[in-house]
Amino acid sequence: GYRVDLPALREVLDGRLLLVDAVQGFGVADLDWSVADAVVVGGQKWLRAGWGTGFLSLSDRALERLGEDLTGWTGVEAPTRYDARLHDALPSAARLAMTNPDLVAAARLAMALRLVEAFTVSAVDSAVSETVGRLRETVARRGGQMLVAVEPERSAGILPFTMPGFAGGQVGAALARRGIICSIRPDHVRLSPHVSTPDEIVEIVDEALVSLR
């Protein structure tokens, strides 16, 4: 859940390509993605578009570096002209397409992006940050420990924590009994509240952690 400083990375790379796996931040962290040469996003996380969705955005120089060898049959000019000849690769990043897209998944992703755009990323960022801050205080008050010491301004909405003396499965079960779904690991759990997470979630988490004692 660490919010990286992309412009600072851009400055120190000295001409090298900046490749960003944005699945844990796109749609929730208000960052300047344009400084990256490649941004790879899965739509199943913060965009809530479901599995099988995502996209790749490339800068012109990244596309140039990749060349024209990485392509599929739909990444060329006139792919359905079956004339037994080699077709030129498309000039855009569309040349990286391996086959035809899943149109249902593409529609889900499009609607998810429109929803975020309508609400604005900054509004999502602000709402999620506020909820995470309140949850962080509650976890600390009940003896929990953050898995990674991240300053609030560097947190991207993911809250991994341990409850000393309790396995991740025990903490997860206590949360599940109160209707909270979280990611469970052997020694910790991970909460990822979204903009639609109700305010009362903080009190519910508090009750779950108290029940462990």
Image: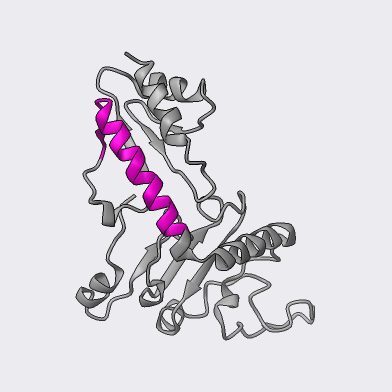
Report the colour scheme: one colour
Quick check: 142 above or below 91?
Answer: above
Quarter of the picture containing the C terminus is top left
Relative depth, front residue between 17 and 24: 24
- The answer, for residue 157, to whether it is visible in the render is no
Magenta region: which residues?
124-147
Quick check: 123 above or below 80?
Answer: above
Tell me where residue 90 appears, x and y as whole percent: 61, 83
Is 178 on the left or on the right of 132, as rendered?
A: right
Residue sitting farthest toward the top? 213
Tell me where residue 123 appears, x and y as whole percent: 46, 62
Is 87 on the left or on the right of 145, as rendered?
A: right
Q: Residue at x 27, y 75 (%)?
A: 10
In the picture, residue 113 is in which quadrant? bottom right
- Secondary structure mostly seen in magenta is helix
In the picture, residue 6 is in which quadrant? bottom left
Q: Residue at x 50, y 30 (%)?
A: 180
